[in-house]
Image (cartoon, rainbow, N blue to C red):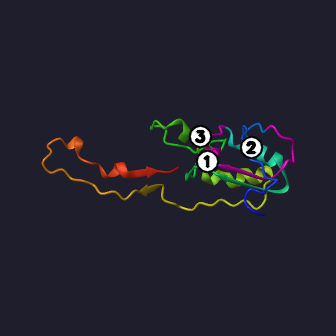
């Protein structure tokens, strides 16, 4: 069909831990970037499984921590001596995703651990001011980096 002519397509925003839909409602569930903020990842996956029709598919893009250790909820075990931002405290250990999903009943679970760059360089000329004694006015090349993720 032509773009925009998808009568069976819906985009829905909802609390992923308590989806307000009957069971077996969707052919596909997609979460792009917000899943890492769900406090209870197992409950969120459970809800996705519940609302998917038999044979339905899901695609979740989420930030993970490549850690071999995790707590009971699958959250990554981060160095306790560091003060981590709240969002990072909620990241799931990548190694716990597959077993968690399989235990909930998902089949053919694939975890794409593509190691993409998280920083993109913006090509801009960097001016150097040789006569300026104030180093704080010099342009910092790192200011042209854009963090994605």
For disc 3, the marked residue is 90
Contact between labelled residues 2 and 3, with CB atoms less than 8 Å apart = no
Q: How crowded is mark 2: few (under 14 residues within 10 Å), some or many (20 or more)?
A: few
> Residue 122 is drawn in which quadrant?
bottom left
Residue 140: image tag: none
For disc 1, the marked residue is 33
* Vertical placement of residue 42 versus 122, above or below: above
The earlier-in-sequence mark between 1 and 2 is 2
User: Which is nearer the eye, 46 or 123?
Assistant: 123
Count of marks, rendered view? 3
Q: Distance between the residues labelled 3 and 2?
A: 23 Å
Contact between labelled residues 2 and 1, with CB atoms less than 8 Å apart = no
Q: Distance between the residues labelled 1 and 3?
A: 13 Å
User: Which is nearer the eye, 1 or 92?
Assistant: 1
Q: Where does the N terminus fall, quadrant-wise?
A: bottom right
Q: Which stretch did the figure color magenta?
A: 20-39
Q: Where is residue 67 in the image (x, y as percent from the top left)?
A: 55, 51
The earlier-in-sequence mark between 1 and 3 is 1
Which is closer to the viewer, label 1 or label 2? 2
For disc 2, the marked residue is 12
> Which secondary structure, mark 2?
loop
Residue found at x 52% / y 43%: 78
Which is closer to the viewer, label 1 or label 3? 1
Q: Where is residue 133 in the image (x, y as percent from the top left)?
A: 14, 43
Q: Position of residue 77 (x, y in %)?
A: 56, 43
Q: Is residue 95 left or right of residue 2?
A: left
Q: Where is residue 130 in the image (x, y as percent from the top left)?
A: 14, 51
Residue found at x 60% / y 46%: 70
Q: Residues within 10 Å of mark 3 (few under 14, many from 20)?
A: many
Which is closer to the viewer, label 3 or label 2? 2
């Amino acid at each position: 069909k032509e773009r925009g002519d998808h009568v069976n397509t819906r985009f829905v925003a909802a609390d992923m831990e308590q989806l307000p839909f009957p069971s077996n409602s969707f052919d596909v569930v997609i979460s792009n970037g917000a899943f890492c903020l769900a406090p209870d990842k197992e409950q969120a996956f459970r809800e996705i499984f519940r609302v998917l029709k038999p044979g339905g598919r899901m695609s979740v893009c989420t930030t993970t921590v490549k850690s071999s250790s995790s707590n009971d909820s699958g959250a990554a075990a981060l160095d306790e001596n560091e003060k981590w931002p709240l969002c990072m405290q909620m990241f799931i250990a990548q190694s716990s995703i597959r077993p968690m999903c399989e235990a909930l009943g998902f089949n053919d679970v694939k975890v794409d651990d593509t190691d993409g760059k998280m920083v993109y360089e913006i090509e801009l000329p960097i001016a150097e001011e040789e006569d300026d004694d104030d180093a704080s006015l010099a342009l910092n090349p790192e200011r042209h980096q854009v963090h994605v993720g």
